[in-house]
Amino acid sequence: MTDAVTKNTARIRFPKRTSPYIFALYMATIMAFLMSLVITLAEFGMGPHYMENVMNAYQVAMPAAFVCILLVRPVVIRLVSWTVQGH
């Protein structure tokens, strides 16, 4: 990238200490939406209100997923260190 392009692309950068929370936010956002799509389709099928139902489910799933990821992350890190060589 040229200096002109680099200067024009301002982005927010968070401190490194916020990494676990940013990770949890991104993971919860993506996974809760994907799971809402799949579970709504399995439960109600593809109907005229499919996306409305997905978004209603997502409103509950996303905050729950965020909290769960924050709680489970330390356990997963420990499990990975026990099962992957070099960790």
Image: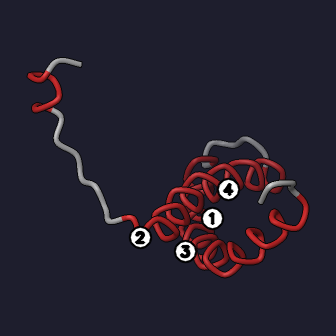
Q: CA distance from mark 2 to mark 3?
A: 18 Å
Q: Amino acid at mark 3?
A: Pro
Residue 86 figure quarter: bottom right
Q: Is residue 36 above or below residue 59?
A: above
Kindly identify which residue carries mark 3.
63
Q: Is residue 41 above or below residue 1?
A: below
Residue 87 figure quarter: bottom right
Residue 54 figure quarter: bottom right
Left or right of residue 81, residue 33 in this image: left
First in sequence, mark 3 or 1: give its number.
1
Q: CA distance from mark 2 to mark 4?
A: 27 Å
Kindly identify which residue carries mark 2.
18
Tag 4: Cα neighbours inside 10 Å, few (<14), some, or many (≥20)? Answer: many
Tag 2: Cα neighbours inside 10 Å, few (<14), some, or many (≥20)? Answer: few
First in sequence, mark 2 or 4: give its number.
2
Which numbered tag is attached to residue 57? 1
Q: Give the structural element (helix, strand or loop) at label 4.
A: helix
Q: CA distance from mark 3 to mark 1?
A: 11 Å
Left or right of residue 74, residue 10 in this image: left
Tags 1 and 4 in contact by the CB under 8 Å rule?
Answer: yes
Q: Amino acid at mark 4?
A: Ser
Q: CA distance from mark 3 to mark 4?
A: 13 Å
Taking the spot 68% from the left edge, 72% from the top edge, the residue there is 73
Taking the spot 63% from the left edge, 64% from the top edge, the residue there is 57
Kindly identify which residue carries mark 4.
36
Tags 2 and 1 in contact by the CB under 8 Å rule?
Answer: no
Coordinates of residue 53 in the picture (x, y in percent): 62, 57
Instruction: Select label 2 or label 3 by which is in front.
Output: 2
